[in-house]
Image: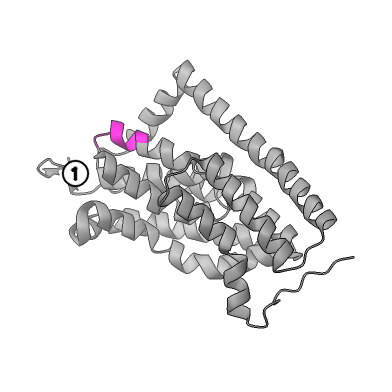
């Protein structure tokens, strides 16, 4: 049985750098050489085989087995989740139900700062937990554009908001697979992620409001920002610590939307903010 040597070069940072060559090459092919995803993946695969055989001394049978495992893992559950998510989204759009969802969320507040917290942060996290793989970024950005956001701003906000849930992906698949590959317990990794990522997650709602309307906007919407931060991050931390990664994006997103909807009953921003328009005093 072949056992991998994690430091074949005798210098840990150099061995790690060599092991990262396929990933770095994949990014270079996409960003610099402008190759398609399939072409970049092919180049990265060749580099990965070369590194595994030449640097780590991986036997061909083990290499073939690892490749087969990778293909099967990509088919199930990753490809299956992506296909079902796209199918469900197109079904919702074709039936008109997605417009109902969008209108229901947007009706909670006309203030775009609150809409960012609702759609990009909370609803985006819910979609990440259900579909994953970048689907919520595209959907939330499109929803924000239809509500009057500038396209570039909408895309940037959706990307930043996805940080809070992106690490856990669809029903915790990245965490579960990472634990399997690393040979560690899923709950141990889940708890580690809670300790590592929660401090940053606490900052995301505040950062989203600042990106959209600066610190003035943060001063005007701090009750909503604080409530959604505490509810979202508190729920996510509790789920990661006691339940596992499967619901780490779904439950916080749902409860965050509920919290913002409930807050609307007792508080609304004094000024309604819409990009490119004068501030209106809310009634």
The quadrant of the rendering that contains the N terminus is bottom right
Which quadrant of the view contains residue 8?
bottom right
Q: Residue lying furthest left in this view?
A: 278
Which residues lie in the magenta part? 142-148
Q: Residue lying furthest top in this view?
A: 95
Rendering coords of residue 249 (x, y %): 55, 50
Residue 143 within the segment the image draws in magenta: yes
Residue 258 can be seen, yes or no: no
Could you tell me which secondary element the residue under label 1 belongs to?
strand
Which quadrant of the view contains residue 151?
top left
Residue 249 can be seen, yes or no: yes
Question: Taking 186 as reference, is 69 above or below it?
Answer: above
Residue 226 within the segment the image draws in magenta: no
Tag 1 residue: 272
By what rule are the colours in the image chosen?
A: one colour
Residue at the spot x=51%, y=65% of the render? 197
Magenta stretch prevailing secondary structure? helix
Q: Residue lying furthest right in this view?
A: 1
> In the visual, does 164 lie left or right of 41?
left
């Amino acid at each position: 049985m072949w056992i991998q040597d994690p430091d074949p070069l005798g210098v840990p940072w150099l061995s790690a750098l060599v092991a990262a060559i396929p990933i770095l090459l994949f990014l270079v092919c996409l960003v610099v050489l402008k190759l398609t995803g399939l072409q970049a993946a092919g180049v990265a695969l060749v580099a990965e085989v070369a590194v595994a055989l030449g640097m780590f001394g991986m036997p061909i049978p083990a290499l073939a087995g690892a490749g087969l495992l990778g293909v099967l893992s990509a088919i199930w559950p990753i490809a299956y989740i992506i296909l079902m998510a796209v199918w469900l989204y197109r079904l919702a759009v074709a039936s008109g139900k997605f417009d109902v969802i969008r209108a229901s969320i947007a009706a909670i507040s006309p203030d775009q700062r609150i809409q960012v917290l609702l759609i990009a942060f909370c609803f985006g996290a819910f979609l990440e937990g259900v579909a994953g793989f970048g689907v919520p970024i595209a959907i939330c950005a499109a929803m924000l554009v239809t509500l009057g956001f500038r396209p570039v701003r909408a895309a940037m906000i959706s990307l930043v908001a996805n940080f809070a849930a992106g690490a856990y992906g669809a029903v915790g698949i990245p965490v579960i697979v990472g634990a399997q590959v690393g040979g560690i317990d899923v709950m141990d990794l889940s708890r580690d992620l809670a300790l590592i990522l929660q401090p940053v997650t606490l900052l995301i709602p505040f950062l989203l409001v600042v990106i959209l309307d600066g610190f003035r906007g943060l001063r005007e919407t701090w009750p909503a920002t604080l409530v959604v931060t505490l509810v979202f991050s508190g729920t996510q931390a509790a789920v990661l610590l006691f339940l596992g990664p499967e619901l780490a994006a779904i439950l916080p997103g749902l409860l965050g939307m509920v919290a913002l909807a409930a807050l609307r009953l007792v508080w609304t921003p004094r000024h309604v903010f819409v990009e490119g328009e004068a501030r209106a005093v809310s009634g």
